[in-house]
Amino acid sequence: MQYTGHEQESLDGMTLTEDRPGAMDAARRAMIDSQLRTSGVNDPRVLAAMAGLAREDFVPAALKNTCYVDRALPLGNGRFLAAPLVHARMLLEAAPEDTDKALLVTSGSDYLAALLRPLVGSLDAVDVAELGGKRLKGGYSLIVVDGAAEQLPDSLNKALADHGRIVTGLVERGVTRLAVGRKALGQLALLAVAEIGMPVLPELSTPKRWSF
């Protein structure tokens, strides 16, 4: 199959766009149909949120024509915007409600915050680089971590209300997985639900130990 310079292309799961009127809207629709729906993301609220938000507004100008590809995009300074499917799966597992008091741990992008904010009662955001030195309010019914962590800091457990839920990425031996958890009796238990490629957060790595 051949493509002209004015057509949208979907090659190996990547949605590329050209600078022409309506190209970004077409790429966003293709993302919904070829990446999300085909991967089992069919929740109307999740699809509507992602269909209504211009992902191109959250990437550097040089990446706008590739902002709907099925992979993470570099934002500079070691930060990345996760692939669309990662954020869709996070929203799906979070099952946000308008009664939720939510906290989002961000990593260089406000894209997930813009998706999540209309779906919850309130949303606070903290950059992962500031997590260690920032006093969190607490009492959150939902916490979402935008990336994969080797180890979640205790501050997130303390900030999560009892029976509250958390959605995060986990990384173990170089493999990243989407995980969900709930807090009960002060303890947070996580369950990996899907292996999926996502940006790793070095700020949430396990402290290295000396070995001999």
Image (cartoon, grey):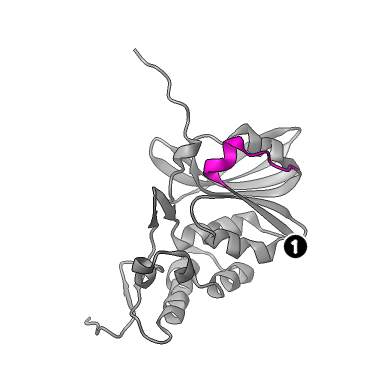
Q: Is residue 116 above or below residue 33?
A: above
Looking at this view, name the residue that lies furthest to the top.
212
**Image location of residue 16, percent across then percent down:** 34, 73
Q: Is residue 99 above or below residue 33?
A: above
Label 1: how many Cα within 10 Å (few below 14, some 14–19, many 20+): few
**Residue 132 location, quadrant:** top right
Task: Please tell me whether residue 134 belongs to the stretch shown in magenta.
Answer: yes
| One can see residue 14 in this view | no
Q: Is residue 89 above or below residue 179?
A: below
* 66 left or right of 129 in image: left
**Residue 190 location, quadrant:** top right
* 180 left or right of 75 in image: right
Q: Is residue 2 above or below residue 152?
A: below
Split into 4 quadrants, where in the image is the C terminus? top left
Looking at this view, name the residue that lies furthest to the left.
2
* 191 left or right of 203 in image: right
Could you tell me which residue is drawn at 54 percent across and 58 percent down? Answer: 89
Task: Read off the magenta span.
Answer: 127-138
Could you tell me which residue is drawn at 56 percent across and 55 percent down? Answer: 90
Question: Which of the pair 30/42 is nearer the observer?
Answer: 30
Could you tell me which residue is drawn at 70 percent across and 40 percent down? Answer: 159
Could you tell me which residue is drawn at 43 percent across and 85 percent down? Answer: 22
Task: Please tell me whether residue 25 belongs to the stretch shown in magenta.
Answer: no
Split into 4 quadrants, where in the image is the N terminus? bottom left
Amino acid beneath label 1: Asp
**Image location of residue 99, percent across then percent down:** 78, 58
- Write down the residue under mark 1: 98
**Image location of residue 111, percent across then percent down:** 53, 62
**Image location of residue 142, percent across then percent down:** 69, 50
* 172 left or right of 193 in image: left
**Residue 184 location, quadrant:** top right
Secondary structure type for disc 1: loop
